[in-house]
Amino acid sequence: MSTAAARACANIALVKYWGKRDPDLNLPAAGSLSLTLAALTTSARVTFDDALDRDELVLGGAPADEPARARLSRWLDIVRDRAAERRFARVDSRNDFPTASGLASSASAFAALALAATRAAGLVLEPGELSVIARRGSGSAARSIFGGFAEMDPGTRADGADARAWVLDHATDWPLCMVIAVVGGGVAKSIGSRDAMDHCAATSPLYRGWIESVPHDLAAARRAIEGRDLAALGVVTEASALAMHAAAIASRPAVLYWQPPTLACLTAVRRLRDAGTEAYATMDAGPHVKVLAHAADADRIAAELAAVAGVSDVLVSGIGGGAELLA
Ligand code: DP6
């Protein structure tokens, strides 16, 4: 038996990943840029064991459903191939936030799993290689290997070896926060990001325009981060999220993640801004609204969002670090 455990933080994309250039190798069609969040973590233990006759997955203390177990098993094959490991694995993964709610649980999960599974299989890989392995599980997971601001490079190689994330900026000197308004009680989303982005690429007349907008947004976000300019970063963060959702909404049939409280939160964020608080919203494949702001404004923003009808919970997070091994 050989075992290892690791923890990784979720990340929220400020410039979104939404579309693939190769679904089999899970290669993104464009770059993306994210902020890693300290308060949303997944811890995972992977144990390769001769006694197992198939991979096992326990999620949050309960056996996972078959699609999740099979997806993990296919991903473990990548680690097994790389390490010449023949044994099946027992995997125990737990989040400290609602799973499948659009709070990016696959990002922290596959980042933690990439570190734990490779170590359990006897491999010691540098973070860039871990990012490539995490990406095969979930594109956004490639970014959760790193702390601070992480940027995903879509790469150009057919084998995807250069499609990996890296640390753009640890930002330890920049006290930012993300305030998350949980909408709809953390219920499972209707269509997962993977199927939704494929459907969007296949049917949305806005998809091409969305992909073409990404390099420009990435450049603007990099400049804003370098200049520690929250207002500039916030403008591109909102623009990227709205463009991604516009492309998704224009899919046929539509992919619409927003619920009425989502729009009410967006209005609250505008109201805060009009009153002088720098606050900028982003949304992923779910109804929740995540607000980028100065850490000093977290309480005021959290109170404003908590007062929105339909918001069931508000979480506040600072900037998180990279994936790490656990004892
Ligand atoms: C809206 O990483 O979940 O959160 O690579 O198919 O697993 P797969 O997709 P996933 O997509 C994340 C989409 C997003 C935006 C983002 O995190 O960049």
Image (cartoon, grey):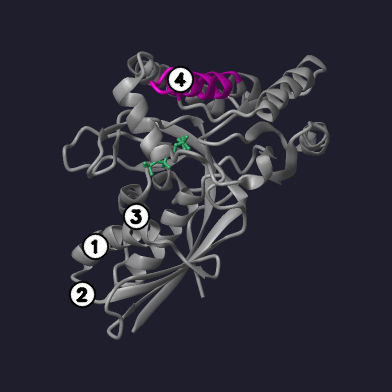
Q: Indicate the amino acid at tag 1.
A: Asp
Q: Residues within 10 Å of mark 4 (few under 14, many from 20)?
A: many
- Residue in view at x 40 percent, y 30 percent: 18
Q: How many labels does the image show?
A: 4
Q: Is residue 155 above or below residue 93?
A: above
Which label lies toward us, 2 or 3?
2
Q: Does the magenta stretch include residue 175?
A: no
Q: In this view, does 316 lie to the left or right of 124?
A: right
Q: Name which of mark 1 and mark 4 comes first in the sequence.
A: 1
Q: Which residue is drawn at 76% across and 23% down?
A: 268
Residue 310 rendering spot, x and y as whole percentages: 74, 35
Q: Can you give x and y, in whole percent of width and height, for residue 276 in the image?
A: 80, 18
The CA distance from mark 2 to mark 4 is 44 Å
Q: How far apart are marks 2 and 3 (CA)?
A: 20 Å
Whether label 1 touches label 4, CB < 8 Å: no
Q: Quadrant of the N terminus?
A: bottom left
Residue bearing the label numbered 2: 86
Q: How far apart are marks 3 and 4 (CA)?
A: 26 Å
Task: Return the mark for residue 130.
Answer: 3
Dominant SS type (magenta): helix
Pick the residue in front: 262 or 130. Answer: 262
> In terms of sequence position, does the residue under pointer 3 or pointer 4 come before the other?
3
| Of callouts 1 and 2, the N-terminal one | 1
Q: Which residue lies furthest to the front in this view?
A: 253
Identify the amino acid type marked 2. Arg
Please name the residue that numbered disc 4 is placed on: 217
